[in-house]
Image (cartoon, rainbow, N blue to C red):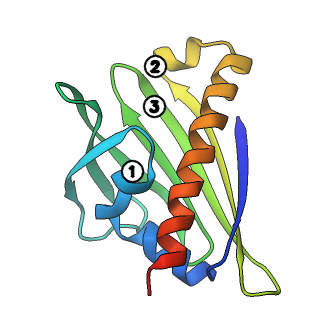
Amino acid sequence: MTTNRRVVQATPEQVWRVLADGWLYPVWVVGASRMREVDGSWPESGARLHHSVGVWPLLIDDSTEVLESQRDTSIRLRARAWPVGEAEVAIELHAQPDGSTEIVMHEDAVAGPGRLVPPPVRGLSLKWRNVEALRRLAYLAERRS
């Protein structure tokens, strides 16, 4: 499992608003290329985002499901991109005394061929990818009113 952290100049509520807008998923998630549908109950447990990953014309249509969700605090997701596999992603929002938020993201492959990649290699690629994902999430949270 990899863990990435970033402090953003936004409140947990502002960060949550980005996470709670399923249509923004491909804007901050590296590899997601477009949204096809967002369940009306997103981001409640059991809700799904229907997205595509990859680059045209090599797109894979799949989904991401909310496993657990606590408003303004945390969300745990099961992201699917078959035939590559599935990953579990947990995002925690920690309010800081100065009004900023520390975002902590944990991710690892949990099913499929991606799980066969040796953990050190898998961890390094996820770490790099999620540095960029948190940078994008920060830009959105800090610049939305």
- Give the residue at x 73% y 55%: 5
Query: In the rendered structure, are the residues bearing label 1 and label 3 in contact, judged by CB atoms less than 8 Å apart?
Result: no
Q: Classify residue 142 as left or right of residue 131.
A: left
- Give the residue at x 46% y 67%: 19
Q: Please rate how many residues cluster around mark 1, counting C-alpha atoms within 10 Å: few if below 14, some from 14 to 19, many from 20.
A: many
User: Residue 18 got which mark?
Assistant: none
Query: In the rendered structure, are the residues bearing label 2 and label 1 in contact, judged by CB atoms less than 8 Å apart?
Result: no
- Where residue 17 appears, x then y in whole percent? 45, 77
- Total marks shown come to 3
Label 3 sits on a secondary structure element that is strand
Label 2 sits on a secondary structure element that is loop
Q: Is residue 27 above or below residue 82?
A: below
- Give the residue at x 34% y 19%: 83
Query: In the rendered structure, are the residues bearing label 2 and label 3 in contact, judged by CB atoms less than 8 Å apart?
Result: yes
User: Residue 65 got which mark?
Assistant: 1
Dot placed on the residue nearer the N-terminal end, 2 or 3: 3
Q: Determine which residue is flagged by label 2.
A: 112
State the residue in front, 113 or 52.
Answer: 52
Q: Is residue 46 above or below residue 18?
A: above
- Give the residue at x 83% y 86%: 97
Q: CA distance from mark 2 to mark 1?
A: 17 Å
State the residue in front, 114 or 31.
Answer: 31
Q: Is residue 64 above or below residue 86?
A: below
- Where residue 64 appears, x then y in whole percent? 37, 47
Q: Determine which residue is flagged by label 3.
A: 86
- Where residue 110 appears, x then y in whole percent? 55, 29
* Disc 2 residue type (three-letter): Gly
Residue 79 seen in the current view: yes
Q: Quadrant of residue 73?
A: bottom right
Split into 4 quadrants, where in the image is the N terminus? top right
